[in-house]
Amino acid sequence: MMVWKEKSAAGRFAEGNKVAICIIILAVACLWNMACRTQAVYAKTDIKERMDGYLQSSVKNAHIPALSVTIVDKDQVLFAKSYGECHSCDTPFLLGSVSKSFTAVCIMQLAEQGKLRLDDRLEAYLPDAADGGRITIRQLLNHTSGLGEHQTLENYKIVNKQGVHHYANVNYSLLGEVIEASSGRPYRDYITENLFAPLQLSHTAASRSESIENGLIDGYTNYWGMRVKSSHKYPSDKNAWISVPAGYLSSSTNDLGKYLQMYLNGGEGVLSQPSIDTMFYGDTAYVDGKVPYEYGYGWTVIKEPLSEPILRHSGLIETGVSSIFILPESGIGIAVTANVNDYFVTNNMMDGLGWGVVLMLLDSPPNNISGGAYLLRHAWIDLLMFVVAAVAVVSFCLIPGYARKVSRRKSLAAAAGPVLCYLLATVFIYLLVPVCFATPLWVAKAFVPDVFWTVAVSCVLYLANAVWRGVVLFQKIH
C-alpha cells in the first residue's frame, strides 16, 4: 500500500527547482520549434529559386501582364519579387476586397477607443439608415446583416435571413460611413492617420489622386482572350457598388507585407491582440462551399484540408486581382497582386497561383499552370459566345428568305412560329446572365465585358429579327 508523506521544505524546494527547470526547457523547445517552423521552408537552399521559377512560369502561362509577390515573417521579408510590367514590389495595385480587412481594423480601433460598440445598431451612428434599427456593426463586419449582394448605399435594405453569411459590398460601404460618423473624420483621413502612417505604408492610399501619385500600375481587362489596357474604374462617389472602404484601397506588396507583419506581431500598437483574435476567430460566420470556410471581420478562415489553418482574403476589381494570406502557426504572411481581370480564366489561375505559393511554403507540390491551359479554356468560352452571336447573325441574314416563304404560305400560324421563337430567344439570352449566374448585366458589363457585349449584340439581333419578321407577317395579313 502506497503511503503519502509530507515532504520537507528542502525536499519541496528541490522538487520545485526540477519542475521549474523542466518548464523552462519546455518553453525554450516550443519557441525553438516555432522559429524552426517559420524558417523550415527556407532551410532548403533552393526554395527561393523554386518559388521564383514557379512564379515566372505561372505569369507566362496565365498571361498575367504584371505580378508582385511578397512573403514575410514577423521580423523580415523572406521573399519579394515582381514580374512582367511590374518593376518593383513598391508599385501600388488596386486591392479590391482585400481593402475590407483594412476597414475592419479601423472599426476595431474605434471599438478599443470606446467610440463605438460592435453590438450597437447602425442607427446609433447613421440615424437615417434603412433598417438601421435591425442591423448591428458586428453583422456588417461578417456579412450577416441580411443586405443584398448587389445593393449600394442608395438602395440597400434587408432581403436575406439575418445571422447567415451573405457577402455584400454594401456592408463595408456602411462601415466606412460608421467610421466617419464615430471618428468625426473622413474615411480617407482616418485610415491614413491611424493605419497607414503608424505602419509606414508609404505606397498605400485611399484616394485616386494619391494612388496615381504613388505610381499606381496600369490595369487590363480581358476581351475574348485578348488583354486590353483599361482605365481604372475608381468610384466617383460613396454610392458606387464597390466603394473605397469595400474595395478601392491601393497598396504595394511591400506595404502589404508590413501590414501582415502587424498581425503577426500582435498589433504593433495599432491594434491589440484580443482585437486581432476577434477579427480572425471571435465571431465567424460559416460559409458552405466546395471548400467550407468561416468569415470573420475582413478575413476568412480555412481549416481544412491543408496541414494548418489559413487566414485569407481575395480581391477583384475591373482591372486586377489580389490576395493576402496568413499562416498563423508558421508565422508567415503572403501578399499577391496582379493587374488583369479575366474572370473565367486568368482569375482562376491567379487563385491557384496564390494557393500554390502557400502549398510550397507548407512543403507541398504547388498548383502548376500548364502552357496550353489559357488558350484551351478561352477557346471553349469564346466558341460558346461565338455560337450564340453567330446564330443571331445568320438568322438575321435569312430574313429575305422568310419574306418569300410567307408570301407563298397559306398558314399564318406556321409563319408566326419564327417570330415567337426569336422573341423567346431574345428573352432567354437577356436573362441568361442574371438568372444562371445571379449577376445583373451592369455587373457583367464591368467585370465580364466580352460576355456582356456578346449578350447585348445577340439580343439586339434576335429582337430585330423578330420585329422584322413580324412586320413581314403583318404585311401578309393585310
Image (tube, rainbow, N blue to C red):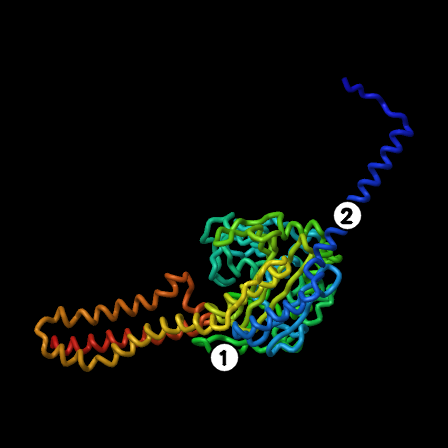
Using the rendered image of the protein, determine whether residue 455 is visible from the camera's viewpoint: no
Instruction: State the separation of the CA atoms marked 1 and 2.
Output: 54 Å
Q: Quadrant of residue 338?
A: bottom right
Q: Tell me the residue that label 2 is attached to.
A: 29
- Furthest residue to the left? 410
Q: Is residue 14 above or below residue 301?
A: above
In the picture, measured across the screen, residue 101 lies left or right of residue 40, that is left
Q: Is residue 47 above or below residue 398?
A: above
In the picture, measured across the screen, residue 224 lies left or right of residue 181, that is left
Disc 1 versus disc 2: nearer the observer: 2
Q: Quadrant of residue 419?
A: bottom left
Quick one: quadrant of the N terminus?
top right
Residue at image position (19%, 77%) is 471
The secondary structure type at the circle numbered 1 is strand
Residue at image position (63%, 58%) is 363
Identify the amino acid type marked 1. Answer: Val
The picture places residue 433, in percent across and down from the top left corner, at 38, 65
Q: Tell me the residue that label 1 is attached to.
A: 228
- Furthest residue to the right? 10
Depth check, front residue: 308 or 194: 308
Identify the amino acid type marked 2. Answer: Ala
- Furthest residue to the front? 45
Using the rendered image of the protein, determine whether residue 405 is visible from the camera's viewpoint: yes
Residue at image position (19%, 82%) is 400
Residue at image position (85%, 34%) is 16
In the picture, measured across the screen, residue 223 lies left or right of residue 125, that is left
